[in-house]
Amino acid sequence: MLRGDIIMIGSRLREFRSKTNIKMPAIAASTGITKGTLYKWEKGTRPSNLEEYSKLKWYLDAMENKLEIERLDQEDKKPATLRLPLKSGKPASPQVDGKAAAGTIVITDNEPELIVDRITAPFLGPAEGVVEVVGQSMEPTYINGCRIVISRLKDYRNLHWGLYYYIIDTNWHAIVRRVYEAGNQNSLRLVADNPDQLRYPPIEISMDQIEAIFKVNAAIIKY
């Protein structure tokens, strides 16, 4: 048994009660530990009775595992794809019918929306969805068929030259490229990673031809 686990049991109990709103008398009844003892532990007193500590640890392990299973069950019930508005910046909404594949543009109430696969990965930051990379233009960085995690770029002044972005033009064509400032102040220079620059030359595109820009947060690659 680790000393750190004993010391942290109080904060773990406090966090659990905050998440579930379960009252201390109910925990006392389930564990056989007095309310007074539990309150002391929650406030920072280090447990001295290892048998009681083990009872609370077992209880929290079981309850937290149950909460995680319930959370995953709820995630499984959610639609697998989302609709991301390209213009208004409104929150993503589920694609309930699931007919359009990720990477497709659909029109809802005159608003163009990008269909993305849902992703639950808080460690990636403000990720809003996943789309697939098609073609060899970005190899070896992003191979054909790999998936990228993207988030909407609401202010194009926040572009960082040399980073990767998912660009959708006004013809609803989408590509992944490294982005640089072009000679024309109102344009961008899109550069492929493929060494064959004759086949995949840099593209200069005016901001007027761009429908939306997404930041590429990460890649999901199957080996």
Image (cartoon, rainbow, N blue to C red):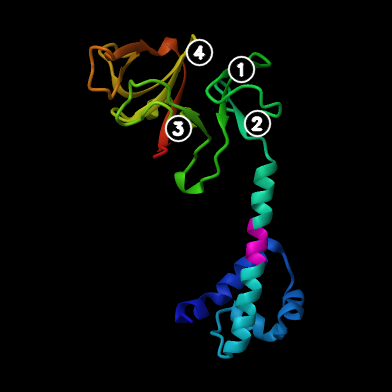
- Earlier in the chain: of badge 3 and badge 4, it is 3
Say which residue appears at 56% left-offset and 72% top-offset: 11
Q: Main secondary structure of the magenta part?
A: helix
- Closer to the camera: disc 2 or disc 3? 3
Residue 103 position within the rendered picture, expressed as x and y whole percent measured from the top left? 52, 23
Tag count:
4
- Earlier in the chain: of badge 2 and badge 4, it is 2
Q: Which residue is mark 1?
A: 106
Q: Are marks 3 and 1 in contact (CB under 8 Å)?
A: no
**Residue type indicated by callout 4:** Trp
In which quadrant of the rendered image does the C terminus lie? top left
- Closer to the camera: disc 3 or disc 4? 3
* Residue 84 picture quarter: top right
Q: Secondary structure at mark 3?
A: strand
Q: Which residue is mark 3?
A: 147
- Earlier in the chain: of badge 2 and badge 3, it is 2
Cα–Cα gap, marks 2 and 1 = 13 Å
Q: Residues within 10 Å of mark 3 (few under 14, many from 20)?
A: some
Q: Which residue is mark 4?
A: 172
